Image (cartoon, rainbow, N blue to C red):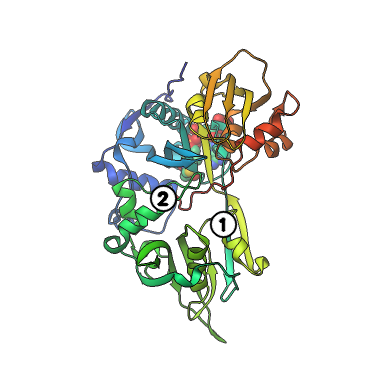
């Protein structure tokens, strides 16, 4: 049985419409402090999909929005071996006056109900703070690298790189909208959500000074082969002069390079822009080809952190919605405090990269885990063995952990390369 959202006494849940944009932004400014003014924010395009946006108000003052959440429709989200309808939970905020009264819990329960109604078996999010979402069954499913490279960092040769030409232009929706949508949407990396709605596309191309962090307008390098656009990098430079000369920097926002030649062509130009001394990468997958292209991998200084968090909302639909890289016949014993109809024993059988079946079973379980750990492992970027080593997955039948871990893994590491 599915759990209906419980609303704390004295509050009501409402649907939000575009005429409440001012209230939405005002509340968002309470939740996420900013030096930008409300008028400045009102002038920006809104990324929201309004029919997926809900608020909470106090019953006695319904005009005052006290909490808000929304989600983006990622109808074509890459998962291992396929594409799935995924909800991207976003714009989660509660006014500080009304926090810790259960409003987030209400919004999460509502979000899960809405996902079920829309047939979205998985929810994905970026966590503002990592302590928030585990309790709701979200697990860290992807990790990301943020790297800084000195100008001129050498790359190993890549066959065909000389045949790729690069043109550098000011980023524009008119000129580059279609090529960015096509190339970004074609990337087959698990968790690589793309901008599917007109609102998200418009926001991505918006170049308001509020979004530049003191940097120049957005630039794009378009890689071409035989007259066809095959990849791109979007970046902003910042000019700076030090006692010994130029100390400018490049901040990369997004690179799409479908093969080594394109990656080489783009990175070699990014690493050699005049008046700059370093390039900071956007969010790179932990297996980004840059790491293998660098002659000296230690030239890349950086940090890693959690990227997206994933919640399995409909266990059979989610497990059957991906492929497995080895044959598997396993019984999973799941716990799920929020969605009890996910809990219990599921038999998963899979052919390597092929047919999958998922069914309820009364057979003894091979592995026991919480839905949070299933979410962490779902995109193939966090291994079940790693989770078991941390005491989060229990092997009940010898050998099942290794077999399941291999099958759930994936040759391409997951990442979402823009924050939604
Ligand atoms: C994070 C936020 C949405 C939580 O809203 P809230 O209404 O206070 O949350 P709830 O009262 O429903 O709390 C639910 C549970 O989460 C816990 N929790 C909430 N926020 C937390 C945080 N930032 N860190 C750790 N735990 C948190 C609560 O203690 C509570 O735990 P319990 O179930 O064990 O009692 C709110 O504080 C907020 O808007 N923060 C600023 C913006 C933000 O970070 N938004 C999230 C964007 S991803």
| Mark 2–mark 1 distance (CA, rounded to whole Å) | 16 Å
Question: Quick check: 91 left or right of 160?
Answer: left
Picture layout, residue 244 above or below residue 76:
below
Residue that sits furthest to the right in the current view: 398
Question: Dots 2 and 1: beta carbons under 8 Å?
Answer: no
Q: Callout 2: helix, strand or loop?
A: loop
Q: Quadrant of residue 151?
A: bottom right
* Crowd tier of the residue under label 1, counting other residues whose Cα lies within 10 Å: few below 14, some 14–19, many 20 or above: some
| Image location of residue 369, percent across then percent down | 64, 27
Residue at position x 60%, y 73% in the image: 154
Q: Which mark is residue 186?
A: 2
Q: Callout 1: helix, strand or loop?
A: loop
Name the mark nearer the viewer: 2 or 1: 2
Q: Is residue 92 in sight in this rendering? A: no
Residue that sits furthest to the bottom in the current view: 244
Question: Quick check: 70 left or right of 262?
Answer: left
Q: Earlier in the sequence, mark 2 or mark 1?
A: 2
| Image location of residue 157, percent across then percent down | 58, 70
Residue at position x 44%, y 69% in the image: 164
The residue that disc 1 covers is 288
Is residue 379 or residue 309 the one in the foreground?
A: 379
Q: Quadrant of residue 179?
A: bottom left
Q: Is residue 163 in sight in this rendering? A: yes
Picture layout, residue 374 above or below residue 213:
above
Is residue 400 or residue 139 the one in the foreground?
A: 400
| Image location of residue 198, percent across then percent down | 29, 48
Picture layout, residue 324 above or below residue 236:
above
Ligand 1 under 8 Å from disc 2 Cβ: no
Q: Which mark is residue 90?
A: none
Is residue 225 or residue 9 the one in the foreground?
A: 225
Ligand 1 under 8 Å from disc 1 Cβ: no
């Amino acid at each position: 049985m599915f759990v209906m959202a419980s609303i704390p006494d004295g509050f009501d849940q409402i649907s939000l419409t575009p005429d409440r944009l001012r209230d939405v932004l005002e509340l968002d400014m309470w939740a996420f402090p900013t030096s930008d003014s409300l008028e400045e924010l009102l002038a920006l395009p809104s990324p929201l999909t309004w029919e997926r946006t809900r608020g909470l108000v106090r019953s006695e003052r319904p005009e005052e929005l006290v909490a808000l959440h929304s989600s983006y429709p990622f109808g074509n989200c890459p998962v291992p071996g396929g594409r799935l309808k995924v909800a991207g939970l976003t714009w989660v905020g509660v006014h500080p006056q009304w926090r810790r009264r259960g409003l987030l819990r209400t919004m999460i329960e509502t979000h899960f109900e809405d996902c079920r109604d829309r047939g979205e078996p998985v929810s994905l999010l970026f966590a503002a703070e990592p302590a928030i979402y585990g309790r709701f069954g979200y697990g860290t499913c992807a990790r990301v690298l943020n790297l800084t490279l000195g100008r001129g960092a050498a790359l190993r040769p890549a066959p065909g790189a000389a045949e790729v030409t690069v043109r550098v232009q000011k980023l524009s929706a008119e000129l580059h909208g279609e090529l960015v949508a096509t190339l970004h949407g074609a990337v087959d990396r698990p968790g690589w959500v793309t901008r599917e709605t007109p609102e998200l596309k418009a926001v991505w191309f918006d170049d308001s000074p509020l979004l530049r962090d003191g940097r120049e307008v957005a630039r794009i390098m378009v890689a071409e082969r035989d007259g066809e656009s095959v990849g791109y990098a979007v970046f902003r430079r910042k000019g700076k002069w030090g006692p010994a000369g130029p100390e400018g920097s490049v901040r990369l926002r997004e690179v799409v390079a479908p093969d080594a030649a394109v990656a080489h062509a783009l990175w070699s130009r990014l690493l050699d822009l005049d008046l700059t001394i370093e390039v900071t990468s956007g969010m790179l997958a932990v297996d980004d080809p840059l790491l293998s292209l660098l002659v000296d991998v230690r030239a890349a200084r950086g940090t890693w952190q959690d990227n997206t968090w994933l919640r399995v909302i409909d266990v059979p639909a989610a497990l059957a919605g991906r492929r497995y890289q080895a044959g598997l016949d396993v019984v999973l014993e799941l716990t799920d405090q929020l969605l009890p109809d996910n809990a219990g024993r599921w038999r998963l059988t899979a052919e390597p990269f092929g047919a999958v079946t998922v069914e309820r079973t009364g057979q003894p379980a091979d592995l026991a885990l919480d839905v949070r750990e299933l979410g962490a492992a779902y995109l193939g970027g966090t291994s079940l063995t790693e989770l078991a080593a941390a005491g989060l997955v229990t092997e009940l039948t010898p050998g099942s952990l290794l077999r399941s871990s291999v099958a759930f893994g994936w040759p391409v590491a997951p990442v979402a390369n823009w924050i939604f």
